[in-house]
Amino acid sequence: MISRGAAPWREGLERWQRRRAAASAGTFTVTHRTLYILPTAAGAGFALTLFVLWLLAINYSLSLGHALVFWLAAVAVMAIPATAANLRGVAIDVGEPEAVFAGERLRWPVMLRAGAPRFRPLELTAPGAQAVALLTPSLGSVRVFLEQNAERRGLVRLGRLRVATRHPFGWFRAWTLLWPTTSAWIYPRPEPQAPPWPAAASLAEETGALSQGIRPGEEDFADLRPWRAGEPLRRVLWKIVARGGPRMLSRREGPAAGTVLLRWNDTLGAGDVEARLSRLCAWVLAAHHQHLAFGVELPDGVLPPDRGEAHLHAVLRRLALFPPEAA
Amino acid sequence: MNAPAPLLRGLKRLAGPLAGTAAAPLALALALALGSQFNEFPLGIQAGIAVLATVWFLRRRQGAGSLTGWRLWLMGLACALGVRWQYGYWFGQESGVALVALLVWLKWLEARGERDERLVAALTLFLLTAVFLRGQTPLHALAAFAGAGLVLLACARLTLSSFPTQPSGRLDRDVGRTMAWAIPFALLLFVLVPRVPGPLWGLPADARAGKTGLSETLEAGSIAQLARSDEIAFVVEVLEGELPAARYWRGPVLEVYDGRSWKPSPWRVPNPALEATQGPAQVRYRSLQEPSDLPWLFTLERTHALSGAVDVERTATGSWRARQPLLQRTLFTGEARFGEALPENLTPAAIRALTFLPPQVNPRTREAGEALAREHPQAEARLEALAAFFRARQLRYTLTPPAVARDSADAVLFDTRAGFCEHFADAFAVMARAAGLPARVVLGYLGGERNPANGTWIIRQADAHSWVEVWLAPHGWVRVDPTAFAQPERAERSLGEVLLEREGLPLLLRPEWRWAWRLRAQLEAWEYAWNVWAAGFDAERQHRLWRSLGWRPDRALGWALAATGIALALAALLAWWLQRPAASRDPLERQWRRFCRLMARRGLARDPAEGPLDYGERLMRHFPQASGEIEALLRPYLQARYGGTLTADEAAAAMRRALRNLRRRLPQEKSA
């Protein structure tokens, strides 16, 4: 995604950078091997300014003008290692973000730790995400989040992460590149106005009134509250999420009853593969919300009915990895 | 942040929301840059700067957005027209600086982001360097360097502007440290980077010149004005030999007389006899001459060799002249011999020109001169008689002679019988010409004080003097100082001691102000050192330094370039070294790291994710013969770190012992 329409040299450059970055897996510590530094536009402007001032000092034989220019030039030279030192020895750890549905925001937690106490303002850039982090002598480690739009379902990686710094003067930018190996799940987007699953899906004897009575999308919104991290996903009202709203819960617990087998073949009316997966996802969430035991039948296999968080995630992962071209 | 606390508090209150932002140090830097040259701007420019700065300050303080559109263009146009109106021309050094001083505020009013603010910072650096066009005293240097430091601080704050919180105290310390480390390397660059001799594009017509000093013509009263100025004309350091008791510093020689004033001859036959004055020097001296409007170098009488950064030539009259006016402070070295006449073989035509007097001017003086010529056919005797005539007139030496309209020589010799050196020189030269002796007037300085603080000789504008040179057939030009006939001591004593009337002399030239004089002598000694080593460090000075280091100047360029490169590389290296992670102060951690390094050298580096226990187990599996030592090292570490049963120092001591034993147990390093 970086070398989009790229020239061959650009690909070669990235291969070279990847080779160097691969030297440390897991926690990535910046060393001289993975640290790049180049002047910025501001640095070029400063150099031009110094050149003009130097000419001025020469033309008017200003000895102290020379002294001033030389001092500024020496500061600029000192700024090179000073800029690099902001990044050297910084350990970068990209954690696993919580699974989200397509269309939500994926929050990658990035843990930054400093080797030695130092003032280190860092700028993090990943495809579609930006963040800043400030390490200080009293704050040796900091966690920031890189927020990406979760667009396509599946198992995704962050992509190329660039951690850069321009401190102290902004004349040089030191940066490091890494391709974190941690991955995140993006489940298919649940269909907002999904029709109820066909009656034939209900397997057990106590089908009927209950499971058909409370159809997905008919929750009572009387008492809702925001979802907090750590609470079971089962209680989240996915309908709201699917409309782009926040994760909300209702305090009402649906009674546990029944078993459904949600079939790929029943989603034929939804449209293409993605739309069918969306409908299946909505059904899965509805079934989970109603405490039904649910199973999913896909063209390439059947997930037997079960209950619980773990089962839900297993099913959703399976849906996330569903081959896009399959019919 | 503690000493000038009330001042800082006041500044913070004034700055309001600007405090802590990049704009605050940048505004201070601009204030330093413009404040230290504010007096040099014309009133209109001063008003413009004040108005724009106030507008900028008020808008920024209120958080008003950036100014755009026609109002800005209108203001820019007004600034340009204002500069044109105040200076009377578009392009020049003074008007250029004034224009930048105005436009920098407009740019800042329009500034929208980091890039614009950086442009303002660059313009501020330009204005700070322009401070040195006004003067290069330590005060100017202080203002410019402090301002540049503030600009750098502003750059650092701009870099952090995308961060939500800016702990400015910590940032300022970081930036300050980088700037301090740069100082030694800046000094190296100052000494080593070869100086390019300027000017590159020619000085604009309005480049600054000296304010006071001798002019190139002699008129009644032109030197008496200077006698009241105690500004330094030049400072002389004797390198070899001794200065003579009568120290005549020769400048322009005036050979053309129009009845009122004396001027240098625009057309002069060359004087090949001057070549004969080459020879071993009796005195070698170095002179640092203050800027002036004129190209003349004031040299000790009979200076026959001169070297310095400026391009000089010896005129046919034996004075030294640069190709351009000496608008900068000039350092040169001279060699001189004394006691000899300046040789020249005058042709009859030249003798006629040098004895020319306009008719109908100074009739009485001419008559007296012609009478002397009739009495004494022999030239030397005639000159003797001329001197005797002057002595007999009993002329009075005064700074405030009565005003004379015309026939100045007549007035001085026969009416007022009082005058200053220029009156006497004028009268003597006129009378000598009337007597048939070729004569000319020399402008220069006489005397000078020895500065007890550093042994240099200081020659002030008050020491300005004029005297006469008379040509005697076999010898050449002989110096005659008619002032000595009126006041014999003047030649060897300073003006203050000689002039009894004390008519408006500078306070410090008066004898009873000795203590103040001594204090000033010390200050001037420092100023001389500053002017020679800091403000006056030019290509010539640099070459001399290289020569003293044993580099030949022709090869020194390569050497200096190499040394500059090495200095820069060293700077980067030192900075790298200074910024490496500090050795831990925790004794426990230090021993642990030593242990890890020892093992890493044997190819068993600790994985970053590996805890001490896991690592220890892995090592013991690898070195079963040393497992006891490894355990003896790990146990105190773990106890002190996690158990808390041992203090860190005890544990560190135990670890050190274990490490020593371990070293003995382990096989030699992998590479060996």
Image (cartoon, rainbow, N blue to C red):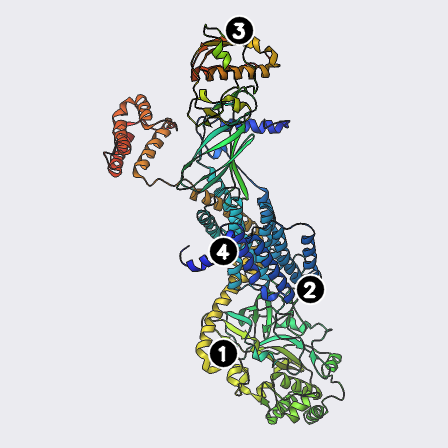
Residue that carries the numbered disc 2 in the rendered image:
B205
- The chain to which mark 3 is attached is A
Residue that carries the numbered disc 3 in the rendered image:
A200
In the rendered image of this protein, does residue B520 appear above or below residue B469? above
Work out how far the residue at label 1 is from the one at label 3, CA to CA, in angstroms: 117 Å
Residue B508, numbered label: 1
Can see residue B197? Answer: no
Name the one closer to the observer, B493 or A246.
A246
- Badge 1 marks a residue whose secondary structure is helix
In the image, which is nearer the foreground, mark 1 or mark 4? 1
Q: Are marks 2 and 3 on the same chain?
A: no
Pointer 1 and pointer 3: residues touching (CB < 8 Å)?
A: no
- Badge 3 marks a residue whose secondary structure is helix
- The chain to which mark 4 is attached is B
Disc 3 marks which amino acid?
A: Ala
Work out how far the residue at label 2 is from the one at label 1, CA to CA, in angstroms: 36 Å
Work out how far the residue at label 2 is from the one at label 4, CA to CA, in angstroms: 39 Å
- The chain to which mark 2 is attached is B
Q: Give percent across and percent down for residue B95.
A: 66, 61
In the image, which is nearer the foreground, mark 1 or mark 3? 3
- Badge 4 marks a residue whose secondary structure is loop
Q: Give percent across and percent down for residue A230.
A: 41, 25
Residue that carries the numbered disc 4 in the rendered image:
B549
Q: Are marks 2 and 4 on the same chain?
A: yes
Q: Which of the two labelled residues, at mark 2 and mark 4, occupies the earlier sequence position? A: 2
Q: Quadrant of residue A27?
A: top left
Disc 2 marks which amino acid?
A: Ala
Q: Which of the two labelled residues, at mark 1 and mark 4, occupies the earlier sequence position? A: 1
